[in-house]
């Protein structure tokens, strides 16, 4: 199974919750430097756009940690997000998570692949007002 297929399978049906819920989209880029400037360029944002880098575990902290008050469905979703985080860590090297913009924040989880795709990752959005 390719890294694209693995990421697709692990993210299938998951929605990133915030003030709205967005799916994950898988992408690949060939021979790309993992820098904030390059990510802005590849995602068609102006160079002056606010971009910040966060840790993968920090980004998923609210959805991949089980709480005492979670019901059965919430616990199942936590397990799915924990699996997604592990799949990302197992399949992408030099991992970076970029948050672009404010309020409607585009998120790009990117890393280098071992299967010749160059750079791959997942994109989603979070709404923060």
Image (cartoon, rainbow, N blue to C red):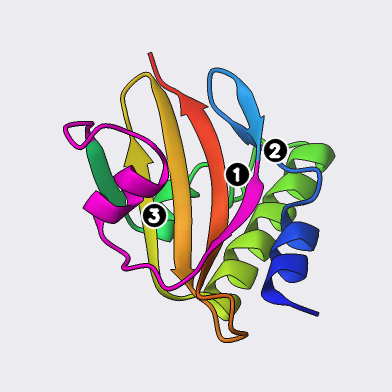
In this rendering, the answer to whether 16 lies above or below 9 is above
Q: Nearer the viewer, mark 1 or mark 3?
A: 3
Q: Which residue is mark 3?
A: 97
Residue at x 64% of width, y 70% of height: 87
First in residue order: circle 3 vs circle 2: 2
**Side of 96 relative to 7 (left or right):** left
Do the CB atoms of the residues marked 1 and 2 lie less than 8 Å apart?
Answer: yes
- Estimate the spatial distance between the alpha carbons at disc 3 and disc 2, rounded to whole Å: 27 Å
Label 3: element kind: strand
Q: Secondary structure at mark 1?
A: loop
The Cα atoms of the two marked residues, 1 and 3, are separated by: 24 Å
**Front residue of 80 and 69:** 80
- Dot 2 falls on a residue whose secondary structure is loop
* Residue 67: numbered disc: 1
Residue situated in front as seen by the camera: 47 or 75: 47
Which residue is rendered at x = 50% and y = 75% of the image? Answer: 118
Residue at horizontal 68%, vertical 74%? 3
In front here: 125 or 18? 125
**Segment tinted magenta in the rendering:** 24-50
Residue picked out by circle 2: 70
Numbered marks: total? 3
Quote the CA–CA distance across marks 1 and 2. 5 Å
């Amino acid at each position: 199974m390719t890294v694209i297929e693995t990421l697709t399978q692990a993210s299938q049906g998951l929605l990133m919750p915030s003030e709205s819920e967005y799916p994950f989209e898988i992408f690949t880029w060939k021979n790309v430097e993992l820098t904030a400037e390059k990510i802005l360029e590849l995602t068609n944002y102006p160079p002056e756009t606010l971009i910040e880098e966060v840790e993968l575990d920090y980004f998923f902290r609210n959805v991949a940690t089980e709480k005492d008050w979670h019901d059965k469905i919430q616990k199942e979703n936590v397990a799915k997000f924990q699996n997604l985080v592990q799949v990302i860590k197992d399949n992408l090297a030099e991992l970076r998570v970029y948050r672009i913009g404010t309020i409607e924040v585009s998120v790009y989880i990117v890393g280098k692949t071992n299967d010749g795709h160059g750079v791959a990752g997942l994109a989603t959005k979070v709404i923060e007002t």
